[in-house]
């Protein structure tokens, strides 16, 4: 009853480092059952870079699920990038969910890019100028969609995959002043109310790997500069003596 | 103490202005703003698009710290910073992200 989840974010691929990541994925099937990509897969967010990402992660011996990050939106080609990845067999989540079956053990993955706004008591609110309202509304609507997607997910394990952070814990090392641009507590609140086994995010390159939501859900920042390794592997179902 | 150049009268105070940049430089060129300008350029210039680079100015030295994914990006960061703050010496302390093997799994 175990599932081994490999995860990494912020690989920021581009022409200059084409092909370099692929080598690091050799033998992944011996370490993990699935690979989750936590956004910022490109640097400029162009279709050309999207193609490089697709080449790098296509036809792996394990299924790949991804979300996009803010860099993947930079050239207004996020839909095209998602399509390119989809054509390469990579499931891109856009505030929805997917279910993977590993010999009868089912893993549900919910998520999307996420967004910022800050953390409880020190955050932006939907008040004042239209620009401010739309900033916070974007995060609120995302959180609502994730909540709904989780609610409809009856699987053995549930993992949330995001680019932005749900908590401050994993931002330690980032300047305090930019926390509101690194994540939002609304993402944590939405997930805590439904429950899940793991929350993965990237985006905070200078943060730390481990944190926890107010509801006790484990959070892991898998941004490549934070991990310093090709990907992290988390074994779900660890209490089972037969597993991991 | 002034002399005529065509229609313009140039005082000595104004003429000496350029020679003492630190005391009399316009406030818009305070190191604080130059560092902010460099940081924005690194984020917004399409050659870099690097959001996590720390920029510090000490005297005529401009320090860059952070991590990027490749050697070429490390050099571009220094180039863009140098263009944005001409006259400062760039000290490029940016490193390339080191990627080790996946290593131990964590049991949850
Ligand atoms: Fe990133
Ligand atoms: Fe990001």
Image (cartoon, coloured by chain):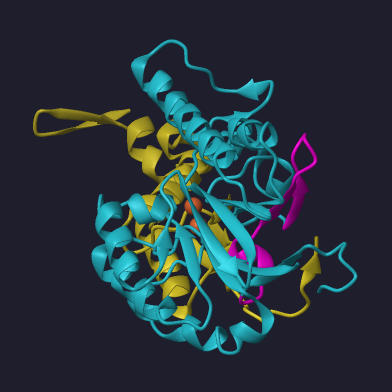
Chain colours: A cyan, B yellow
- Give percent across and percent down for residue A168: 70, 40
- Give percent across and percent down for residue A129: 38, 13
Q: How many numbered discs? A: 0
Against A61, residue A119 (above or below) is above
- Give percent across and percent down for residue B30: 49, 38
Q: Is residue B20 visible?
A: no
Residue visible at 29% across and 70% down in the picture: A87
For the C terminus of chain A, which image quadrant? bottom right
Against B74, residue A74 (above or below) is above
Residue A7 figure quarter: bottom right
Residue B2 versus residue B86: which sits nearer the camera? B86
Is A192 displayed left or right of A73 in the figure? right
* Extreme-left residue of the structure: B6
Against A42, residue B58 (above or below) is above
Is A25 displayed left or right of A218 in the figure? left
Residue B67 figure quarter: bottom right
Residue visible at 41% across and 19% down in the picture: A133
Q: Is residue A224 visible?
A: yes
For the N terminus of chain A, which image quadrant? bottom right
Residue A204 versus residue B47: which sits nearer the camera? A204
Magenta-colored span: A209-230
Residue A32 versus residue B77: which sits nearer the camera? A32
* Extreme-right residue of the structure: A241
- Give percent across and percent down for residue B50: 45, 58
Is A49 displayed left or right of A62 in the figure? left
Residue A57 versus residue B21: which sits nearer the camera? A57
For residue B33: magenta? no
Residue visible at 55% across and 46% down in the picture: A164
* Extreme-front residue of the structure: A104
Is A82 displayed left or right of A194 in the figure? left
For residue A220: magenta? yes
């Amino acid at each position: 009853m175990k599932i081994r989840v490999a995860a990494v974010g912020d690989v920021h691929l581009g022409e200059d480092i084409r092909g370099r990541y692929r080598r690091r994925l050799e033998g992944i099937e011996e370490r993990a059952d699935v690979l989750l990509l936590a956004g910022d897969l490109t640097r400029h967010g162009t279709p050309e870079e999207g193609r490089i990402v697709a080449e790098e992660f296509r036809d792996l011996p394990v299924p790949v699920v991804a979300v996009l990050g803010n860099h993947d939106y930079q050239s207004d080609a996020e839909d095209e990038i998602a399509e390119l990845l989809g054509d390469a067999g990579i499931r891109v989540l856009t505030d929805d969910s997917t279910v993977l079956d590993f010999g009868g053990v089912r893993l549900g993955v919910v998520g999307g890019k996420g967004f910022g706004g800050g953390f409880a008591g020190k955050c932006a609110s939907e008040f004042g100028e239209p620009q401010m309202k739309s900033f916070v509304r974007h995060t609120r609507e995302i959180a609502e969609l994730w909540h709904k997607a989780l609610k409809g997910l009856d699987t053995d394990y549930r993992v949330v995959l995001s680019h932005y952070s749900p908590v401050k814990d994993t931002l330690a090392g980032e300047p305090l002043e930019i926390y509101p641009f690194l994540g939002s507590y609304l993402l944590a609140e939405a997930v805590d109310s439904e429950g899940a086994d793991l929350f993965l995010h990237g985006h905070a390159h200078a943060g730390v790997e481990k944190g926890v939501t107010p509801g006790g859900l484990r959070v892991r920042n898998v941004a490549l500069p934070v991990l310093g390794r090709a990907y992290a592997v988390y074994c779900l179902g660890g209490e089972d003596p037969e597993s991991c | 103490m002034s002399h005529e150049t065509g229609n313009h009268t140039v005082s000595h105070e104004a003429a000496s202005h350029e020679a003492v940049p630190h005391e009399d430089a316009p406030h818009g060129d305070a190191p604080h703003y130059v560092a902010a300008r460099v940081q924005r350029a690194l984020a917004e210039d399409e050659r870099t698009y690097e959001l996590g680079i720390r920029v510090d100015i000490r005297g005529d030295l401009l320090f860059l710290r952070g991590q990027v994914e490749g050697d070429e990006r490390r050099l571009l960061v220094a180039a863009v910073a140098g263009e944005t703050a001409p006259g400062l010496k760039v000290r490029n302390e940016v490193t390339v992200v080191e990627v080790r093997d996946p290593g131990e799994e964590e049991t949850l």
